[in-house]
Image: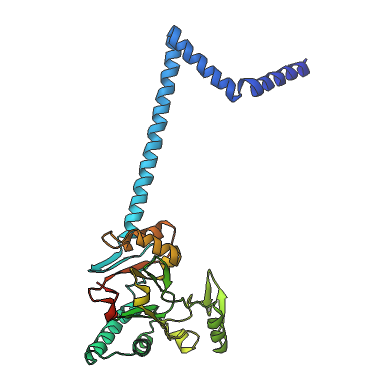
């Protein structure tokens, strides 16, 4: 008798599971209740339908509230990320910089970066002003000399205070016919020529590069992988200004790479000078295309590409300078087809 009862209950359970609780059966049941309510308007069915509608409204309200709170929270996060920004615009030059997802802003507001900003441009300016009018200077030699001098002075000062700060250095010196670019570290410059092509103005100094790796090994140092390849497991670039502990070991050096470009040949539209945060999210070619489409914006595309880098997930500080060029009023025979505005 007990066995028969268990068999009957088992059979009823299978019927419930395989027929009554199937999605299509439940759907038909709901349709039947709706039709019953429409044609017969029974109080019971109206109560069931009204309760269902109220439940749906309540759930929708809760979902909307959650989405709104998440949206506001996201806006608050973005406000916090973008509250620590720095921007500049003057004639043909625009700069936009954000702290991004880093705990600190190291692109600009940091001891080594501040020191180089305060001393290198002024030293170059004073040297150029002291030259006789019309005299052509050896810009590569000038840039190398001034960069190495600033590094020696900064290392002496920061090491006395046990400040281990370091910085990259990217300098573009523009004359009537030439553009001279000096680079130390992994900030990068790229130029857009008259045909819209990307022309590299510098090359990153990274520890994994064969030339840099050999030099580090000869100095008795090593590189290891810690999220990225790093000198002595610490610094993600092989050349920098400052960083006195690694500088004293001679595994990190301040020597700039310097390149000169013929403006008559390139006839550039603009150039981009940016910290490594941008290049984590954009290739040279992508950056040129992106900015070229936005040169008419207030910041010549600098602000847009910084924010786009952030939205693409860049974890670093991001700083971008865009410099526009224009056609010179002088004749091409004078050798100045393009100059900065």
Q: Position of residue 194 (x, y in %)?
A: 36, 68
- The answer to whether one can see residue 48 in this image is yes
Residue 306 visible in this rendered orientation of the protein: no
Q: Measuring 39% from the left and 66% from the top, which residue is drawn there? A: 195
Question: Which residue is the extreme one toward the front?
Answer: 333
140 to the left or right of 133? right
On the picture, is 211 further left or further right than 243?
right
Q: Nearer the viewer, residue 33 or 209?
A: 209
Dividing the picture into quadrants, the one containing residue 19 is top right
Residue 318 is left or right of residue 329, and the answer is: right
Q: Is residue 144 above or below residue 165?
A: below
Q: Quadrant of residue 320?
A: bottom left
Pick out the residue farthest to the top.
Answer: 40
Compare residues 235 and 92 and report the one nearer the observer.
92
| Residue 168 % position (x, y) | 40, 78
Residue located at (42% from left, 72% from top) = 199
The quarter of the rendered structure image containing the N terminus is top right
| Residue 42 rendering spot, x and y as whole percentages | 44, 8
When asked about the image quadrant of residue 305, the answer is bottom left
Residue visible at 71% across and 19% down in the picture? 11
Q: Whole-percent x and y of residue 12?
A: 68, 18
């Amino acid at each position: 008798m007990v066995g028969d009862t268990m068999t009957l209950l088992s059979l009823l359970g299978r019927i419930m599971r395989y027929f009554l609780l199937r999605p299509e059966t439940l759907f038909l049941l709901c349709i039947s209740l709706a039709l019953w309510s429409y044609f017969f308007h029974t109080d019971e069915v109206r109560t069931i339908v009204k309760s269902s509608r109220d439940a749906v409204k309540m759930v929708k309200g809760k979902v909307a509230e959650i989405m709104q709170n998440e949206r506001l929270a996201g806006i608050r996060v973005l406000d916090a990320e973008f509250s620590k920004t720095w921007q500049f615009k003057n004639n043909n030059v625009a700069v936009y910089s954000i702290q991004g997802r880093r705990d600190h802003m190291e692109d600009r507001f940091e001891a080594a970066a501040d020191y180089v900003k305060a001393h290198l441009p002024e030293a170059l300016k004073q040297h150029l002003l002291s030259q006789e009018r019309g005299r052509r200077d050896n810009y590569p030699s000038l840039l190398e000399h001034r960069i190495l001098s600033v590094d020696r002075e900064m290392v002496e000062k920061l090491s006395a205070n046990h400040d281990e700060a370091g910085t990259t250095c990217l300098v573009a010196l523009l004359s009537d016919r030439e553009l001279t670019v000096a680079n130390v570290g992994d900030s990068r410059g790229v130029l857009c020529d008259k045909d819209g092509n990307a022309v590299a103005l510098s090359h990153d100094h990274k520890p994994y590069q064969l030339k840099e790796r050999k030099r580090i090994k000869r100095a008795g140092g090593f590189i290891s992988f810690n999220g990225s390849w790093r000198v002595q497991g610490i610094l993600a670039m092989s050349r920098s200004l400052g960083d006195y502990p690694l500088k004293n070991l001679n595994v990190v050096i301040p020597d700039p790479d310097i390149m000169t470009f013929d403006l008559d040949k390139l006839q550039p539209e603009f150039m981009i000078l940016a910290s490594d945060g941008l290049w984590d999210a954009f290739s040279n070619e992508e950056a040129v295309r992106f900015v070229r489409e936005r040169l008419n914006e207030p910041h010549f595309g600098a602000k847009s590409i910084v924010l786009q880098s952030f939205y693409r997930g860049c974890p670093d500080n991001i700083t971008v300078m865009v410099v526009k060029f224009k056609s010179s009023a002088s004749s091409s025979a004078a050798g100045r087809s393009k100059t900065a505005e």
